[in-house]
Image (cartoon, rainbow, N blue to C red):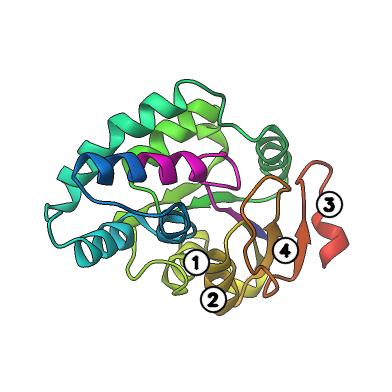
Amino acid sequence: MILGYCFDLDGTLLDTETLWVKAIDEFLQAEGQAISSDAAQALVYGHSWHDIHQEITKTYPDVQMPVAEMEQKIAPYYEALSSACDVRIPTSIELLKELADEAPICIVSGSTRATIERAIGTMDIAPLLQFFLGAEDYSPGKPDPACYALAAHRLGLAPESCMVFEDSQAGVQSAKAAGMLCIALARENAPQQDLSGADGQVSDLGGFDPVDWM
């Protein structure tokens, strides 16, 4: 029986991962570094901000700066991109609202807490959440199960009583390693990833009924 739900943020509730890929690409170009679109995508998808920072500083020795400074430098690129579009995924947000009437809900993301707080405001869902976990709250990041193990603990539930909604291979691996049921959102316009480790895949969370997957 499912007693609690965990939602990933980027790519699951908000269509932001492609924007972060572009923002990091533009940041690195401004720093005099070249990165392919495939490499930028692999860097971002499913990974926490701290892991992204670590990978950038390892791969590009000339781009050495503290994680907070790098975040501040990348943020304007992301904000310029996001201001030009509505990044919300309406059907995913609607499912979260529906499930919040039945069981406790949390967000488990690799983004920073400040970024998640802004996203929650954009979706207007703060009263519906028990809590959220960001990059500062756990280590290591996805695909390690640490984040979802912490979420189950905070929810006061056994992992097998929790359902996770994810969109990345790393996220699916994290949820399953933590012992949770995981549904992968494989949207048609999203980059292809190996989501075969999930318990089920859907192209849209609209009309999703968890009972069908129990």
Residue 128 magenta-highlighted: no
Q: Which residue is mark 3?
A: 209
Q: What amino acid type should be assigned to the residue bearing mark 4? A: Ile
Query: Do the residues bearing badges 4 and 1 touch, measured as CB atoms within 8 Å?
Result: no
Q: Alpha carbon of mark 4 to alpha carbon of mark 1: how far?
A: 15 Å
> Pointer 4: residues within 10 angstroms few (<14), some, or many (20+)?
some
Q: Earlier in the sequence, mark 2 or mark 1?
A: 1
Q: Label 3 vs label 2: CA separation?
A: 22 Å
Percent across and percent down for residue 35 are: 34, 54
Which mark is on residue 148?
1
Which residue: 85% across, 59% down?
A: 211
List the residue tagged with mark 2: 178
Which residues lie in the magenta part?
5-23
Give the amino acid type for the residue marked by disc 2 in the picture: Ala
Q: Which mark is residue 2?
A: 4
Q: Residue shown at 43%/46% (left/top)?
A: 21
Q: CA distance from mark 2 to mark 4?
A: 15 Å
- Packing grade of label 2 (10 A; few <14, some 14-19, many >=20) is many
Q: Residue 84 bears which disc, if any?
A: none
Q: Which element is circle 3 on?
A: loop
Q: CA distance from mark 4 to mark 3?
A: 12 Å
* 2 and 1 marks in contact (CB < 8 Å): yes
